[in-house]
Image (cartoon, rainbow, N blue to C red):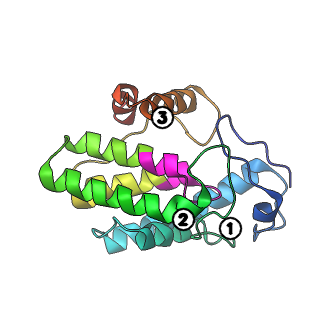
Amino acid sequence: MEFNDPEGATPLDPNEIDGLMLTHMTTRPELNRWEQDNINEALAWIQRRKPKDILHESFMKQLHKQMFGNVWKWAGELRRTEKNLGVPFYQISIEVKKLCDDVKYWIGNKTFPDDEIAARFHHRLVFIHLFPNGNGRHARLIVDILLENVLTQPPFTWGTGNLAAAGLDRKKYIESLVAADREDYGLLMDFVRS
């Protein structure tokens, strides 16, 4: 299968591509449809469960498996390769623990407004880059779970378009993450509720 990833997407290495369970697919749109069907099943799982205890690695891995486990053999497993972004793969668990501890502290001490806590959580998850694929979608979904089930706030709107496809919203989204890399969260804060 030939992958034509949208701008800013992390390419998969050949071993990761070999983890594709649906070998009949030949195009990126087919893959996107199967992944979205799997994500819809994960959304139903979340609605039934209403998880609150989400700030730990095991839940993050379980959520990723729910989102992509019908498509990728490695769904729910931390990446074992270096990518064009993210922390070194051997530091993922350490960075996730630090992030979860930070978010718990921010919530408990009201360090930031709820939306900013969620935006910072999202940025750091994307920055850590836990999985070979699906990191942005996973980070957006877990942030919405945090907002709805922990902070009792409405989920983010994440712009108006499809962030998985190339387009203006994806460009704005990536620009806001790059700005957050420089500790400037203004663009991200504007984008998540746009």
Q: CA distance from mark 1 to mark 2?
A: 9 Å
Residue occupying the far left of the picture: 109
Q: Which of the two marks, 3 or 2, is nearer to us in this view?
A: 3
Note whether 148 is above or below 162 in the view shown.
below
- Label 2 SS: helix
Note whether 36 is above or below 155 in the view shown.
below
* Mark closest to the chain's N terminus, 1 or 3: 1
The quadrant of the image that shows the C terminus is: top left
Left or right, 84 with respect to 193, comes to right
Disc 3: which residue: 177
Q: Nearer the viewer, residue 22 or 84?
A: 84
Q: Nearer the viewer, residue 19 or 90?
A: 90
What numbered label is drawn on residue 159? none
The three-letter code of the residue at mark 3 reads Leu
Indicate the position of residue 109 as horizontal and vertical percent values.
13, 51
Place residue 151 in its image quadrant: bottom left
Indicate the position of residue 174 as horizontal and vertical percent values.
54, 32
Q: Residue at x 69, y 38 (%)?
A: 6
Disc 1: which residue: 71
Q: Residue at x 21, y 55 (%)?
A: 105
Indicate the position of residue 132 as horizontal and vertical percent values.
65, 58
Indicate the position of residue 147 as horizontal and vertical percent values.
28, 52
The three-letter code of the residue at mark 2 reads Met
Q: Which residues are magenta?
A: 124-138
Note whether 91 is above or below 183 in the view shown.
below
Q: Residues within 10 Å of mark 1 (few under 14, many from 20)?
A: many
